[in-house]
Image (cartoon, rainbow, N blue to C red):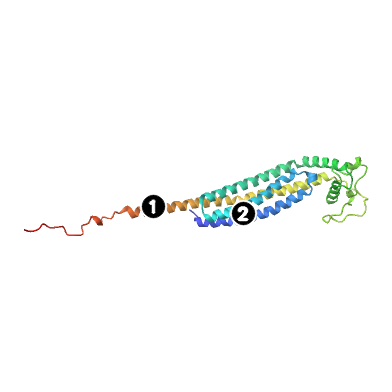
Amino acid sequence: MALSSNCWKYLVLTFNVLFAMSAVVLFGASGFFLYRLFIYRHFIGVTVEYPAILLLMMAIITCSIAWIGWRTAKSMHQIHVIMAGILIILVVIIEFSCFVWAMVVWDNIEIDIKTTMTSYFMLSSENKETNADSVRWDRLHVKFECCGVSGPNDYSSTGHVPFSCCGQGPLDSMQKPYTSDCSTLYQRGCGNLLHDYAKNQLLMVAMAALTASMLQSTGIFCTFFLAHAIKEKRRASIRHSTSVRESTFAAPDDSLLTPTAPAPTLPKY
């Protein structure tokens, strides 16, 4: 063995600490990306959020597996170490699958967003201006400085364009201050802008999943090398015990066969 079992043990313990830290970072990153997608769920649809949701769940599960890996590495039981390695393999596979899923959604998101936004626009146009749907559109217009799905002409059927298409809308601390006049309407639609926004968030989710799967895959090798080192250590211990036992019984004790008293002599008559 190039490294002893104790060396592999401490390497695995160190990996599990880093494994848990990466899970915490992944939890924060995936939660942030999920939030940025969730606030526009009415326009982009909930299916776009699923890769981020899966990545968030894997971050939580990874913390538990890191704790299991720490306990198994300290116990130095081969079968438990192998089971911990299998769990790490499953985590890496699921995270890589999350990367693939995010890229698939990223590639097909344009059609989904345009369809969802058009349906939501038609639904909100049928309601009053004071409802929650109109407020969401106002915030979207002011945030991205856009109007409607493809432009202000989308409101031709309603007979009026909302003031948010020129920067006025419901006050929101997250938005910049609104202008006081409405002399110029935003001519660009929100569809393409929201499409680019969602693609950027999905790309970040995919890169986070790919980076996590690549970094955490190093623990697979460390864990299984530790299992191999435990196996070799056990074999060496068995060989040592066998050699000691064989050396003990190799040379029989013939002292009992050696006469210790003089041979009896015949009596003299």
Residue neighbourhood size for the residue with mark 2, other residues' Cα within 10 Å, grouped as few (<14), some (14–19), many (≥20): many
Percent of width and height locating residue 27: 68, 53
Q: Which residue type does callout 2 highlight?
A: Phe
At 40% from the left edge and 54% from the top edge, which residue is drawn? Answer: 241
Lower position in the chain sequence, tag 2 or tag 1:
2
At 71% from the left edge and 45% from the top edge, which residue is drawn? Answer: 50
Question: Label 2 to label 1, Cα distance in Å?
Answer: 40 Å
Number of on-image labels = 2
Q: In the displayed structure, would residue 9 be above or below residue 124?
A: below
Percent of width and height locating residue 210: 66, 48
Left or right: 262, with 70 as reference point: left
| Contact, mark 2 vs mark 1 (Cβ under 8 Å) | no
**Could you tell me which secondary element the residue under label 2 belongs to?**
helix
Residue neighbourhood size for the residue with mark 1, other residues' Cα within 10 Å, grouped as few (<14), some (14–19), many (≥20): few
Can you see residue 256?
yes
At 78% from the left edge and 46% from the top edge, which residue is drawn? Answer: 41
Left or right: 2, with 134 as reference point: left
Left or right: 166, with 239 as reference point: right
Residue reaching furthest bottom? 261
The residue under label 2 is 19
Left or right: 160, with 103 as reference point: right
Can you see residue 8?
no
Q: Which residue type does callout 1 highlight?
A: Thr
**Could you tell me which secondary element the residue under label 1 belongs to?**
helix
Residue 248: quadrant of the picture: bottom left
Quadrant location, the C terminus:
bottom left
Percent of width and height locating residue 114: 80, 41
Residue reaching furthest left? 269
At 47% from the left edge and 51% from the top edge, which residue is drawn? Answer: 232
The residue under label 1 is 242
Which circle marks residue 177 in the picture?
Answer: none
